[in-house]
Amino acid sequence: MIYKEFYNQSIQSPEAFWEDQANQIEWYSKPSIILSKDENNYPLWFKDGELNICYLTLDKHIQDGYGDNIAIIYDSPVTQTIKKYTFNDVKTEVAKLAGGMISLGFKKGDTAVIYMPMIPQAAFAILACARIGVTHSVVFGGFAPHELAVRIDDCKPKGIITASSGIEVDRLIAYKPLVDEAIELSSHKPKKVIVFNRKLGARVPFKKYDVDYDALVYGSEETPCVPVNATHPLYVLYTSGTTGKPKGIVRDTGGYATALKFSMQYIYGAKPDEVFWAASDVGWVVGHSFIIYGPLINRNATIIFEGKPIKTPDASTFWRIIAEHKVKVMFTAPTAIRAIKKEDPNGAFIKQYDLSCLRTQFLAGERCDVATLEWYNEHIPVPAIDHWWQTESGWPMIANMMGVEFLPVKPGSAGKAVAGYDIRIFGENGQELGPNQEGYVVIKLPLPPGTMLDLWGDTERFKMGYLNKFPGYYFSGDGGFKDDEDYIFITGRVDDVINVAGHRLSTAEMEEIVSSHHSVAECAVIGINDDLKGQIPLALVVNKSGESIQHFQLEQEIVKLVRQQIGAVASLRDVVIVDHLPKTRSGKILRKLMRSIADGENFQTPSTIDDEKIIDEIRDVLKKYEIGVYNKKKN
Ligand code: COA
Ligand code: AMP
């Protein structure tokens, strides 16, 4: 198949194109209306179709005679466990858990929060919710109770599904006390907390709302799939925006199922029964789309990996897993490859494993730098494919569509627009820019099926953030350019969102927390370049006059505060105290200027700056603390 023809069909006749794709999945009632619009003129796909996505991931394969095939491989170097589950096994567990949830009062239209480490029970919980039409909201385990509480208050779950503990490298993290603390902090009080006790030695405090996961599953009957409308919210997944309040991305069911089946086949080129591995976390969109739903809909075995690319136990883990489970298609973030490269620069571990099973390596979550791509290509002889997407899109928007036509890779580019996405580059005033001109990356409406439906409980913010800036187009929040062959290069966020080790974080949220410290007069948090994590946050803080707190103490307290409020995943380690922040005469903090100083980039001092001397002060402080480009270890 030729990419260009395939792509053109999707843009010229979207309804016919996606109707064909919708026919690739099974519906209880096939949609007769393929594309319509909601009251905001936003596309709705397959409006009158009825289906159940849990049915597509499990029951359908069993009915088709594949019940004994492997669905989930749990590989946990941190507990030294490998366990395989067939589609039959998973369906039995999920259907019983769903039955148990019904007995606890959960029903279609309710929401449930899932806060779990990377264990099979996380997948069972997700699928059990989908089975009975409960909208799930998975919260990444690295987030602290405060973040969990914010999400509980926003999506008001009937209950929470959690586990006693998780393991971070060699550290036991007791999840249950974090959930209890979040419930104390939140105004909304979930009625039930279903706890999977891993019996790893972590204390599991008992509360009146607790229900033991094993007892619930054991004591419940299997329950069938509940048909839902195509636009039924399958999940709410919170992601960072430009304010302190996270945004609840709402995903539909029918469009998403269609798009995931399409992605597995045409983007990842995965054939049923092959082993597909996305080394991410169920707390992120990659986990939803390509650890759980996508591979299972496509009847692939998916790997639930509880570990890290390094230190669990070393930089050989990825290669061991690929060889041992015969992984055909893999997906990870470039930061993971950088971490491995740092530990094993000559690829000595790679040589110890037979990786001949691997066909394609996909990379996403952040821009793939050329050095990482080259290192990968030097050591592993399979295509390494960068591809670009977001929590909002739910599936890739720019990629090399490996199931359509393998196009030459241009290092630094995420590839070409995926079928269904009419991607343009706009200038500030909404004018379309020509080849090689950098601007805003926007997508002409209608977006294809499976992308975000709305923001949970906040349609105004949805319109403001994504639709109003360029009417008729979806605004991605990323900058980039297209070359004269339509390859797209993403240059980074144009807002206050930063990307730390593939994790999306909001500097605005960190600023709110830093400012809440009683000794802070004002502050700015910016993302600066980091060799390993891509970006890391740096907080520049102005002390309140008259405060006698030692700089060292203030720095430590701020680091601790952010860790307590957001979680360790925020990775804020660099805090510097300055006398002033550079501002325009009208009082706007010049964050981009500070980023350029820290990254050692050329910049022009803006004519509107209030006091030019402050630039030298910032540079001196960064030099003194050896931060950013002044980090001697880096150079
Ligand atoms: N539960 C509790 N804590 C967690 C956590 C979780 N699920 N995930 C991360 N953390 C903690 C870590 O323990 C670490 O704590 P520390 O500061 O006390 O050491 C902190 O959050 C930062 O974690 P992380 O960002 O993972 O950094 P790291 O230095 O431990 O590891 C990498 C660096 C590059 C190996 C790791 O970030 C990685 O594998 N990244 C790939 C990310 C990815 O796949 N993203 C998904 C997008 S596709
Ligand atoms: P998330 O919503 O957490 O998946 O983060 C999405 C953001 O990560 C995007 O808006 C981009 O800024 C960035 N991103 C993801 N994949 C890529 C990529 N392949 N190249 C460049 N940036 C990427």
Image: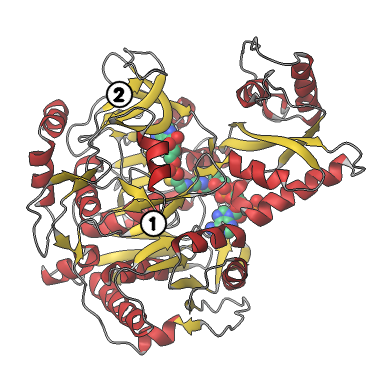
Instruction: Write down the residue under mark 2.
Output: 424
- What amino acid is at disc 1? Val
Whether residue 83 is visible here, answered yes or no, is: no
Residue placed at 26% from the left, 43% from the top? 268
- What amino acid is at disc 2? Arg
Res. 397 image quadrant? top left
Q: Secondary structure at mark 2?
A: strand
Res. 538 image quadrant? top right
Where is residue 231 drawn, in percent x and y?
Answer: 23, 56
> Is ligand 2 closer than 8 angstroms to the Cβ of mark 2?
no
Where is residue 359 drawn, in percent x and y?
Answer: 28, 42
- Horizontally, residue 608 falls left or right of residue 37, namely right
Q: CA distance from mark 1 to mark 2?
A: 28 Å
Residue placed at 59% from the left, 73% from the top? 180
Instruction: Write down the residue under mark 1.
Output: 236
Q: Do the numbered discs 1 and 2 sit on residues whose CB atoms are within 8 Å?
A: no
Res. 523 image quadrant? top right
